[in-house]
Amino acid sequence: MHIRQADDTDLEAVKKITCETIQTIYPRYYPKGAVDYFLSHHSDENIAEDISQKRVFLLEIEKLPVGTVTVKDSEICRLFVRPSYQRKGYGSALLDFSEQVILKKSKTIQLDASLPAKEIYLKRGYREISSHSILTENGDYLFYEMMEKKDKRF
């Protein structure tokens, strides 16, 4: 297992991991309009911008990209592991990695937790700080929680 910073040639890999995870996992938790919203939110343009800002990381197994995370200042974003590689510790490895990156410059880590991931973050010591909903184009709602974790050293 290796985590590295993504570069311009990794756009398709990040997009594939993101879309595959959303399309496979999210329909169990969200209506179609919310799933479509997630897919459009993680557009090529948004991913490419984050890659150009050196915010995106890939987790590789034998040079095969299987997970991704984006770190923006003190926020963890776009943490996805391909469904066939879930429940093997790769998501935890990406979360550990991104927390370490953030804690070098901040005392607090924030993230938006989708319904599939909320329980994982609660077990990792995050707490809910606000709840949000977005009305999608077709009238479905997308619900998520803003969560935060403070550095225990402070």
Image (cartoon, helix red, strand yellow):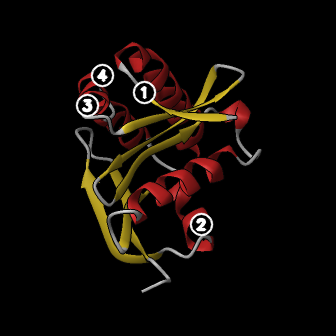
Disc 3 target residue: 46
Q: Which of pointers 3 and 1 lies earlier in the amino acid sequence?
A: 1
Which secondary structure, mark 4?
helix
Q: Residue at x 48, y 53 (%)?
A: 98
Q: Which mark is residue 119?
A: 2
Q: Residue at x 29, y 36 (%)?
A: 41
Q: Amino acid at mark 1?
A: Ala
Q: Amino acid at mark 2?
A: Glu
Q: Nearer the viewer, residue 101 or 41?
A: 101
Q: What is the distance, in whole Å, between disc 1 and disc 4 at their CAs?
A: 14 Å
Q: Are marks 2 and 1 in contact (CB under 8 Å)?
A: no
Q: What is the distance, in whole Å, between disc 2 and disc 3 at their CAs?
A: 26 Å
**In the image, residue 144 above or below residue 7:** below
Q: Residue at x 70, y 34 (%)?
A: 1
Which secondary structure, mark 3?
helix
Crowd around label 2: few <14 · some 14–19 · many ≥20 (10 Å)? few
Q: Which mark is residue 44?
A: 4
Q: Which mark is residue 6?
A: 1
Depth check, mark 2 against mark 1: the one in front is 1
Q: Which of pointers 2 and 1 lies earlier in the amino acid sequence?
A: 1
